Image (tube, grey):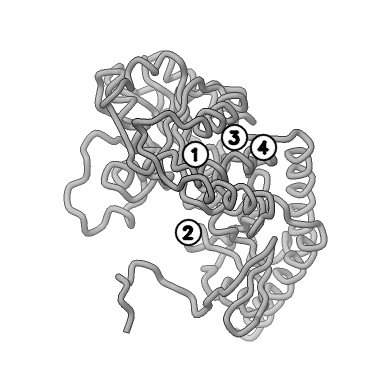
Amino acid sequence: MSYLFPTYARWDVTIKEAKGSWVTDVNDTKYLDFISGIAVCNLGHANEDVTNAVQEQLTKYWHMSNLFHQPIQEEVAKLLVESSDGDAVFFCNSGAEANEAAIKLARKHTGKTKIVTFLQSFHGRTFATMSATGQEKIHQGYGPLLETFQYLPYNKLEELDELGNDVAAIMLEVVQGEGGVVPAEEAFIQKVSETCAKIGALLIIDEVQTGIGRTGKPFGYQHYGIKPDIITSAKGLGSGLPVGAMIGQKALIETFQAGSHGSTFGGNPIAMAAAKVTLTKIFEKEFLKEIEKKSHYLIEKLNSLVGKHPQVNEIRGKGLLVGIECKVQVSDLINQLREQKLLVLPAGPNVIRLLPPLTVSFEEIDLAAKTIASVFLTVDHSVRAH
């Protein structure tokens, strides 16, 4: 009997330790981890520099109310601001909380309530962020959602022209991760940005999965030459410690004054210690260049080994967020990959999602690609058998 609510479809794997790109289960079986805690452990598991920073902070103090000044919060906020188009940061504990803060800020600042998001988006599981998410399966069973969200088709331009001045914000991911690893098209992103300017809406970019170097830039929106009003971040921000951040432009600071929003654990000093090291390492130019090289290498390898497979539609993504779209449901393939000691995720029923640590080696990429190719060979056999 478990004492936990069964809210997760857990695999029959129990991890006892992890290091770098590898995890080991209680049976001493080692797996190559191309999940990274769902784009969380961007520096790999148990990074020594992060470990040392956290241990040092543990000897000082663990928690202090946000009524007190905490210099480490300012240091982490400065790193985020210097590598984005924002000017101020609100710290919280997760991506959903960062998106909640963004939704509240947009509504309070504009005085409007409607927020436009996109079909197949994913923004979180709190009531507001669930309402913002454009997936029916996330909505089911909870009764009426917040009525102030409107969903448009992703990567389509026409319906943007129909939006009016009652829109507080347009909110989107530049790569829909949970929605199938679908990158935004350049023309679409430019049209969204222009529409926001035209109708007086804020532009919110959800970088929970694409941020902190995952796409080869500090934030994914930087591939598109736009300037968001609000950026949200979490996942890779703390190397596994729970931390989220909402980054906003200077014009928004007056709207979020004392008492307008808060979080008991937001900006926790232990999480900040992890975030400071994580950002310092990942935002180095050479580190980001290496991510781009690894991304090209991974996609080229996959294209050469499985790209022409009859059951593969497309291999796509940005940086080290890569999807293999298949003509068949991928749950069995993912199970087979796990049996071959490679951990990957789905992104919807037909897409295999790859999220290796940003520190993954070229040799580990080779091993993952060969393992994927070997499993697709079994798909060949099953197709011929039928």
Mark closest to the chain's N terminus, 4 or 2: 4
Number of the front mark, 1 or 2:
1
Asked if marks 3 and 1 touch (Cβ < 8 Å), the reply is: yes
Mark closest to the chain's N terminus, 3 or 1: 3
Vertical placement of residue 85 versus 34, above or below: above
Position of 224 with respect to 267 (left or right) is right
Can see residue 261? yes
Mark closest to the chain's N terminus, 1 or 4: 1
Q: How far apart are marks 4 and 3 (CA)?
A: 14 Å
Location of the C terminus (image quadrant): bottom right
Identify the residue position indicated by label 3 in the image. Answer: 219
Identity, as a three-letter code, of the amino acid under mark 2: Gly
Number of the front mark, 3 or 2:
3
Position of 145 with respect to 162 (left or right) is left
Residue 63, quarter of picture: top left
Asked if marks 3 and 2 touch (Cβ < 8 Å), the reply is: no
Q: Residues within 10 Å of mark 2 (few under 14, many from 20)?
A: some
Identify the residue position indicated by label 4 in the image. Answer: 280
